[in-house]
Image (cartoon, rainbow, N blue to C red):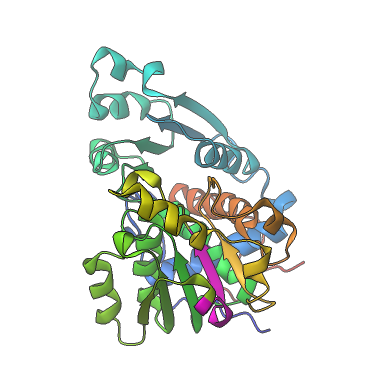
Amino acid sequence: MADKIPPVQLSKSQFNLVGRSVVTLDDVSAPQISYLLRKARYISDHLPEVSQAAAGKILATLFYEPSTRTRLSFETAMLRLGGHVIGFAGAQNASVSKGESIADTLKTVANYADVVAIRHPKEGAALVASKSVDIPVINAGDGGHMHPTQTLADLATLQSRFSRITDLTIGLCGDLTFGRTVHSLIETLCRFGNVKFVLISPKELKMPQYVLDRIKASQSCTYEEVTDLTAVIGDLDALYMTRVQKERFFNEDDYLRLRDTYILDAAKLKLAKPTMAVLHPLPRVNEIATEVDSDPRAAYFEQVKNGMLMRMALMSSVLGVKLPGFAEDDTKEVRA
């Protein structure tokens, strides 16, 4: 299938992200996202060539709450570019435990590092951080608000599986009320258009109205809301699973009645297309049976790698790092 990364229709200066902070994907235009997808694909094919591109650059990872995948992904991304990493994991390991403000921490760290990745339990913390310093700040998750690099990983996974991120039917299943990843993915895909969303959830965890309004505002995206995964799984190109959490229900009987409906197993996969991709932001609990891991449609660990590649693309862009052989204008790119 021909590669269909949406074309970059900006000049070099317009898709230039040097020095930019990324708090939400609203900070990045659709053509710039396309550019990052192309850059990540290039990095994937040319890891040895880019391994010293960011030599001498330093990433500070400021993680005020626990994280495994996201922190290690950012750190590995910088190391694979040849840079270095400093930082902390857990507020108890930082001066915030002494009462220091986020702004003061950032102003201090900006003397040590060239770029910051911050995760914080409070919504808006990444924005405060970005306004405190002149170096790029990347939001690695702030409360239940935004997690832009997870969405970039999701887009890269769709791109790698289908060679496009448009003209797809995508099911989003589970907790659609509180799932920040599905909200961000929908909003971003609506910027590209031509996606049908199938929203699969119990009535207690339906998609918020503001997200539905965003889909309605798109000229070419549509949606339908259903409660039965098995009834629609055969229509899907991709299925994005999320965890249905017991604590979201007022009635435990309702939870017990519904929970198995939203567990993806081999029996349900038999109803799906052989090319369907299964995504999940991780960590999972029991919403995807481990027997699914060996199915070629399981793409959630592929998402992990794509997250690293997209973070490499993003950090190299905000740092102004040139990747050997990569053509910014897509006309002179050296290919393997």
Residue 7 position in % (x across, y down):
49, 79
Residue 30: tell me if it is visible. yes
Instruction: Note whether 271 is above or below 314 in the view shown.
Output: below
Q: Does the magenta stretch include residue 146?
A: no
Apparent side of residue 14 relative to residue 229 in the rendered image (left or right):
left
Q: Which residue is drawn at 50% across and 64% down?
A: 240
Pick the residue in front: 196 or 205. 205
Residue drawn at the location 24% of the way across and 80% of the way down: 217
- The image shows residue 14, relative to residue 148, as above or below, that is below
Give 257 or 205, whichever is nearer the viewer.
257
Quadrant holding the C terminus: bottom right
Total of numbered circles in the picture? 0
**Residue at left offset 43%, top offset 57%:** 257
Does the segment drawn in magenta span residue 238? yes
259 left or right of 124? right
Q: Is residue 98 above or below residue 6?
A: above
Residue 332 seen in render: no
Residue that sits furthest to the right in the current view: 336
Q: Give the range drawn in magenta.
A: 231-241
Residue at the limit of the structure toward the front, as seen here: 253
Give the x, y percent position of residue 6.
49, 78
Q: Relative to residue 1, is residue 108 drawn left or right?
A: left
Q: Name the quadrant of the N terminus.
A: bottom right
Q: Report x, y in % for residue 221.
A: 36, 83
In the rendering, at what x and y percent does residue 316 appear?
A: 52, 50
In front of the other: 172 or 259: 259
